[in-house]
Image (tube, rainbow, N blue to C red):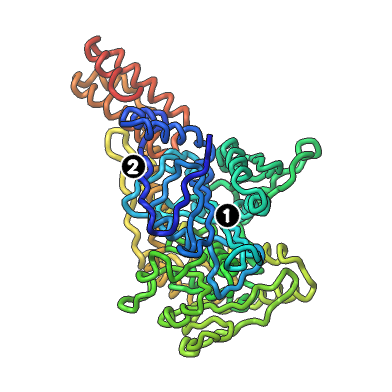
Amino acid sequence: MALRGPAVFGPGSRGSLDEAGAEGREAEVLAAAGAALEDDEEEEGRRGLLRWDGFSAWLHCVCVVGFDLELGQAVEVIYPQHSKLTDKEKTNICYLSFPDSNSGCLGDTQFCFRFRQSSGRRVSLHCLLDQFDKDLPVYLKKDPAYFYGYVYFRQVRDKTLKRGYFQKSLVLISKLPYIHFFHTVLKQIAPEYFEKNEPYLEAACNDVDRWPAPVPGKTLHLPIMGVLMKVRIPTCHDKPGTTQMVQLTQQADTHTSVILPTVHEVDLFRCFCPVFLHSQMLWELVLLGEPLVVMAPSPSESSETVLALVNCISPLKYFSDFRPYFTIHDSEFKEYTTRTQAPPSVILGVTNPFFAKTLQHWPHIIRIGDLKPAGEIPKQVKVKKLKNLKTLDSKPGVYTSYKPYLNRDDEIIKQLQKGVQQKRPSEAQSVILRRYFLELTQSFIIPLERYVASLMPLQKSISPWKSPPQLRQFLPEEFMKTLEKTGPQLTSGIKGDWIGLYRHFLKSPNFDGWFKTRRKEMTQKLEALHLEALCEEDLLLWIQKHTEVETVDLVLKLKNKLLQADRENLPVKPDTVAKLRTHIDAIILALPEDLQGILLKTGMT
């Protein structure tokens, strides 16, 4: 099957059709979609979707972005051919796939960007059908509103071209936030693609289409152009802070070329190295969802630093928007740089000096120089007042008037400084820094988890014949009172205004996102317990005391419960579901034959 699509130049090209959206099970969706197809072209498109099912579990598409003398940056090729991108999405990919001209990136550069999915476009088929999301840690779950772009950009001198330079980017577009994994994939295929062009890329896409699904917790063997990658995607059941290393065995690994210890983590210490004296203050700013700008010399440094900041509050998810690389051409540029309202809760990574003026009103700006290779340490930047950020060539520093709530932990600074003096590897420094951030975040979140758990109704209050009870309301002042005896002081030696930090956090998008997630989990747990309570009842005895109408009503309600358990992935034991199905069948068989026929056709049993 030919993969090459027509060249698509910039924002002026014709709009493509939205992707088919659907809900429910894959077979039902595809059957319904197949029935609705109106012409041969759409039929071919649907077959293409089925053909590329394995590919779609990992990637939305692959783009090649080049430079056209007349039109500027342009999407030249989209793989596979049926992949749909709106004009707005193509424009964003065009501009985000190239470094700003002032970056001066000669040679090969890798970086990542994140952009908003166009409104009006329906959610793609494989996102709705993805059952693996429920087993992922919350910070690795896909955000249906955003795409990631993973870029391998090459700029080399070429006298045969009019501009004197060869400039091209190979870009992987995905919903998955597996930064390290996709950068590794690009390292394997991009250099050869630039030499061999389209046939090589077609073969690489075919390899991806044969990959197993991205199931969390399993060791996955992923062949790509003669190289075998071995990875494990974390699960929500993993102990935070531990990396389930892919196990090496002499026999199984004779052909393994690349083993990835992580799919998503960045080199935390390398990114925090210029600012590690202020790492705790930056942790507070990220935790509180404060507007934050990273001004860096290149997209690779801006994107790595933004991703490191988002990662530093793990296992908490950063719920606000973040853009590892943001340009003046971005579709949200006006929205994020306007002075008519307060800066939004977002972390932006920028390289264009123009932003020093445009974002001067933002409250927190990190300006970094070139990130040093592992083993070297740059001069530590200072915290400076925002009024000093006036010129485009301002020195590196953290420009803010923010006063941290917590006292600085000098112990971690001494530990990292000692590591630098002893030439400790950057990976080992990152492990120390990641553990420090993890312990800090856990000390902060445990009191909240403990209080929220107390909002759960007692199991004895769950009656099979009544609706599941509601969670108690979260009362900020009631929570604050719990901190005196069961606050962060139980697990952290860091002093400071913890109460003030909590008060600020409770007003932040991160608290809102975290609490909505916990409330949903607990509500689902109540629904599951209600289902189990129903299973323990003698339902055949119950129907003897009730009318046929009430019995039919019970059967329909039980069937709806089963559908809900399946649709919402309720945490129900498999034997509970089997038991309930048996109960339903037994009740139906106890009814007159005419009702049996109707109820057996109604819904799923």
Q: Position of residue 226 (x, y in %)?
A: 71, 41
Q: Is residue 18 visible?
A: yes
- Decide if residue 583 is on the left or right side of residue 407: left
Mark 1 neighbour density, 10 Å: few (under 14) some (14–19) many (20 or more): many
Type of the residue with mark 2: Ser
Q: Is residue 451 visible?
A: no
Q: Position of residue 210 (x, y in %)?
A: 59, 35
**In the depicted view, which residue is nearer to us: 294 or 522?**
294
Q: What's the residue at 64%, 40% (across, down)?
A: 220
Give the SS element for disc 1: strand
Vertical relation: 133 (above or below) 350: above
Image depth: mark 1 or mark 2 in front: 1
Question: Dividing the image into 4 quarters, which one contains the C terminus?
Answer: top left
Residue lying at the far top of the rendered structure: 593
**In the depicted view, which residue is nearer to us: 586 or 431?**
431
Residue that carries the numbered disc 1 in the rendered image: 170
Quadrant of residue 101 in the image? bottom right
Q: What's the residue at 37%, 68% (across, down)?
A: 507
Residue 461 got which mark? Answer: 2
**In the depicted view, which residue is nearer to us: 2 or 111?**
2
- Decide if residue 439 is on the left or right side of residue 94: right
